[in-house]
Image: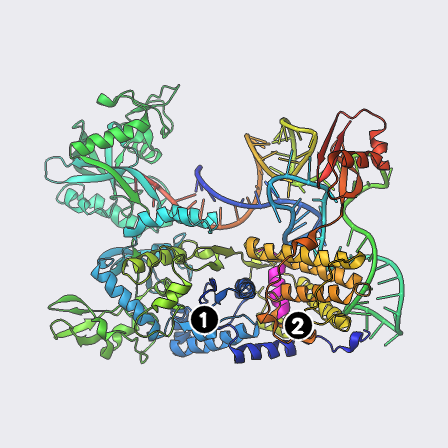
Amino acid sequence: MSDVGGAERYDPAAVEAKWQRRWAERRSFAARPTPGRPAYYVLEMFPYPSGDIHMGHVRNYAIGDVIARQRRMQGDAVLHPMGWDAFGLPAENAAIQRHVHPARWTADNIGRMRGQLQRLGFSYDWDRELATCDPRYYRWEQLFFLRMLERDLAYKRRALVNWCEHCATVLANEQVVDGRCWRCEGVVTERELEQWFLRITAYAEELLRDLDRLTGWPERVVTMQRNWIGRSVGATIRFPLEDRAGEIVVFTTRPDTVFGVTFMSLAVEHPLVATLVAGTPAEEAVAVFARRVRATPREERAGGKEGVATAAFCRHPLTGARLPIYVANFVLMEYGTGAVMAVPAHDQRDFEFARAYQLPVQIVIQPEGERLTASSMTAAWEGPGRLVDSATFNGLPSETAKERIAAVLAEKGLGGPAVTYRLRDWGISRQRYWGAPIPVVYCEGCGTVPVPEAELPVVLPEDVALTGTGGSPLAAHEAFVHTRCPRCGGAARRETDTMDTFVESSWYFARYCSPREERGPFDRAEVGYWLEPDGVDRYIGGIEHAVLHLLYARFFTKVLRDLGYLALDEPFQNLLTQGMVIKDHAKMSKSKGNVVDPDYLVERYGADTARLFCLFAAPPERDLEWSDQGVEGMSRFLHRLWRLVHALARQLAPVDTPVPADLGGVDRDLHRRTHATIQRVTEDVVERLHFNTAIAAVMELVGALGDVAGAASPATLREAVDATLRLLAPFVPHVANELWERTGHPGTLDEASWPAADAAALVRETVELPVQVNGKLRGRIVVPVDAGDAELLAAALEDPRVQQYVAGRPLRKQVVVRGRMVNLVV
RNA sequence: GCGAGAGUGGCGGAACUGGCAGACGCACGAGACUUAGGAUCUCGCGGGCAACCGUGGGGGUUCGAGUCCCCCCUCUCGCACCA
């Protein structure tokens, strides 16, 4: 290549090292509350320190970095922190397999990954870095737990829980995916254990209601959370037992079908089952059946409708009819009351069950324009209709009947309107070592006693034996387990379960406001400045957390608000869920062998190229198909930019030379293009978050700049080059900064302002408009921008190609849209 | 089954409110510069000889539809015996 302008070759490694050093030395990205400046908090979901940064991280953080850098240039005070979701199972597994302590393993990984992030040039405020395994972090979490305990938002109970055999621990409902562990994909079974729960159900209504306020969230995520919370409106109905005290309470969404009940179905786990069958001939059969159902994994239970009759009966609360009680495999103890009133005529499951066990079908809803008969039915009628054989409710539409019947039940003390949620309380006990200790002790005399706040943190001891042979390592740590009861001073044992790591990630975003604060979890002023009242301005992460993390964090935010820590209803005002990084039509993963190593990319092409490709190849919310050749393309663009700017350097007017008002020809056009690009890029970056089109627009400007290099005046060239570098700064900060410095700017580009489009520059005198004949493009005309309809029409008719198509035929209609097009209908 | 989203060149993707389909990039082709080129630069690049035809398929609304309406097909994701 000819050595244009005497410049040396673009060497990304040298340029990037130089600027990264400078940023670190100057603490360029330290977030400082600045009165009079708008605060902007942009956050990417923090990583689990698994060992290495992967392309998914690079994409996620590149998106966040564009936003952070653009906002800084725009004049906002920006908080853009990074930290580590550092507790969790992989650390423990590594310890068992490789005999490294989880703390060591985690710290090493953090060190390595921090270096990788720094080499990518992300503009984090490293002074605010935090790791959740640090006692200075989790001590506050323990405090929150104690406060939740006081308010009965944390509680312990014996419960059926999801147990992952492989991970040897309990999983929350949210962590069971298709009957398998979310992490290791091992089969999940049921176990009954003493567990700590957080009462997220107390917030079900608010979590659901406030979804409507999350207008900055993708609808998909909102819908998933709505479905997960799963609110059902209906009624509870009490069915008294026959010949003994007690009753079966059911929840139903169809109180209108109550007169169609012909039997009862109980879950095998229902507490009443044992007493109902005790000493009856059914006892043995029910026990066998219950054992079998319990042993069946949840996903397989969905097979067929099966059940066993107990010998017991109950009474219909309104008719007094005698109803047999069954135990059935399809009734879930976790939902509603674990008991179902069976209405075979109007519920498909009950219908199938009734047919299988020859139970009566009683029609009580007749659909519009049809006449169902029990004997001819092949499926339940689950739709609306009018009530029949329902005493005083006959003739009512089913919708009205739902309310009337619920009201009557309430009057008579037989039940009443009720709402049920699918959402369960959050089980947070984990029988594992590498997590935050749950701050309670068990005293023989006093029972469960909270650790006094003054004694926090309950520090996780490091000297444990990690054998992998089962059982919590903490339980084997004598010095940790044996303690004194804070209440009576007697001997006591510590809780040896640790907290689910999702607890740590439920509040970390708030801790970033004051990560070093020791007097409390949050510094009032910092939290007030950065976070309140609307939360993180822009949160970016993968869709896989749509219900897990994002629901827990919402819950925690509301709890912290009610505990008086935060004046905040929702943690994340705007959410951007970025797509996966795909290669060869599959998600990049080690097991598939299709990973691209960011280190290699940085080494070979530089961080700027890696970032640019991630941002250019697809809009953020879509999946990104990896292309090695696409990466080459981005690298070429940066080399071209480097050469062009160097070639132009000597032609540029001094910094800040104003562009004259009376430009002509090439200059006028370049000036206009510069400002048009500023406008387009600003809109794409700030409002649409479509970085791919923003980059494309800058590429066009760079192309135009190359075309007019020799012809334009120094002042317009200076303006165009400066604008290009400013617009590129958030995407490729190293090379943009370097070129900025090399084109004579005294300050750094990081400190420069985001350019503003000048409306006057955008004005054009003439425009080229398409002319259609009968809706088909036939010609183009160049007309003054302010041309009137008549002028446009005349110009259109003068176009030779248009004339050819009109061919003297009379105009039936003409459509003239000023500034857009002309359509002639003949 | 319920819910959400998506189908545009060889590929990734543009076209924001109905108004020039395919911006930008990749791949590909031709040429230039060269001892050489996997560097760089220039030009071309939806299909068709053409009239024309083209945004998953079929209808419709409109002067005009990738965009709006109806029906259908395919794919992705989430939930799923939820009473």
Highlighted magenta segment, given as a residue range: A605-619
| A741 is within the stretch colored magenta | no
Label 2: chain letter: A
Residue A591 visible in the current orientation: no
Chief secondary structure of the magenta span? helix
Residue A740 numbered tag: 2
What amino acid is labelled 1 in the image? Arg
Residue A32 numbered tag: 1
- Label 2 secondary element: helix
Quadrant location of residue A519?
bottom left
| A611 is within the stretch colored magenta | yes
Quadrant location of residue A817?
top right
Q: CA distance from mark 2 to mark 1?
A: 25 Å
Mark 2–mark 1 CB contact (< 8 Å): no
- For the point 77% across and 37% down, the residue is A771
Q: Position of residue B51 (x, y in %)?
A: 83, 34
Label 1: chain letter: A
Residue A714 visible in the current orientation: yes
